[in-house]
Image (cartoon, rainbow, N blue to C red):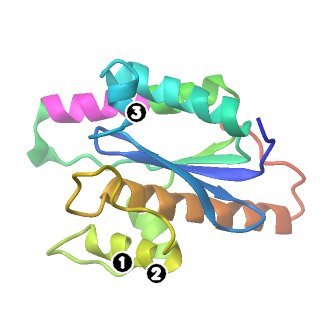
Amino acid sequence: MTGRRYVLGIDPGLQGAMVGIDLETGQPFEASWADGEDGYIDRHRKVLEAAYPAELARWARTWGPPELVVVEAVQLRAHQGLAPQARAAYGIGIVVGTVSALGWPRESPTPTHWHRVLSMPASPQDPKAPVIAWCSRRFPQLDLFPGARRKRPHDGIADAAAIAWFGVLRARELVAAGEEEIAPAV
């Protein structure tokens, strides 16, 4: 464990990801993704309920606890149907519950909020395109094509990196306001 000071951004879900951004350098130092080749859902018994807690524990063992965890507050849509909504809400609850149980400080901005803070334009045709473009410009060293067979950028990694950057800005804002420590979410 290095004791690194970092913010962990989490895009929850089956195609989600986690990205850590170092508070000193402002650069990502690790990304892990949920789906596909080498994804943490496959590594941790192919069950979402086991994957997220196990992956968060791995991050803690490897890097120490984060200064702040930012979990996207996913907005569910009525046209998705009840079963997918229930599954998504359950997965988000697992992530938030694990972060809370570990006593890590947490914020949960909506996509609309963190998009606005990062001045990200909306694109009705392809809602993931602006995030992928922003991430490619801001963090060109971050691999958005993990695994040997991926043909399209992993939008979960791009989202998690943008969410983590939102968290870096938020952490700096709290420190500038004179708060010594970021309090855990209750």
> Residue 171 colored magenta?
no
In percent of width and height, residue 15 lies at: 29, 44
Q: Secondary structure at mark 1?
A: helix
Residue 40, label in figure: 3
Q: CA distance from mark 2 to mark 3?
A: 26 Å
Residue 127 at x, y percent in the picture: 24, 69
Q: Is residue 2 visible?
A: yes
In the image, 7: left or right of 30?
A: right
Specify which label sits upstream in the sequence, 2 or 3.
Answer: 3
**Is 87 included in the stretch rendered in magenta?**
yes
Q: Which residues are magenta?
A: 83-93
Q: Are marks 1 and 2 in contact (CB under 8 Å)?
A: yes
| Relative to 20, 87 lies left or right | left
Which quadrant holds residue 101? top right
Residue at 32%, 33% in the rendered image? 89
Q: Amino acid at mark 3?
A: Tyr
Residue under numbered circle 2: 137
Mark 1 vs mark 2, CA separation in Å = 6 Å
Determine which residue is flagged by label 1.
Answer: 133
In this view, the residue in front, 46 or 122, is 46
* Disc 1: CA contacts within 10 A as few (<14), some (14-19) or many (>=20): some
Placement of 79 over or under 119, stated as above or below: above
Q: Is residue 124 left or right of residue 62?
A: left
Residue extending farthest to the front is 148
Amino acid type shown at disc 2: Arg
Q: Main secondary structure of the magenta part?
A: helix
Can you say which quadrant of the picture contains the C terminus? Answer: top right
- In the image, 71 versus 15, the foreground residue is 15
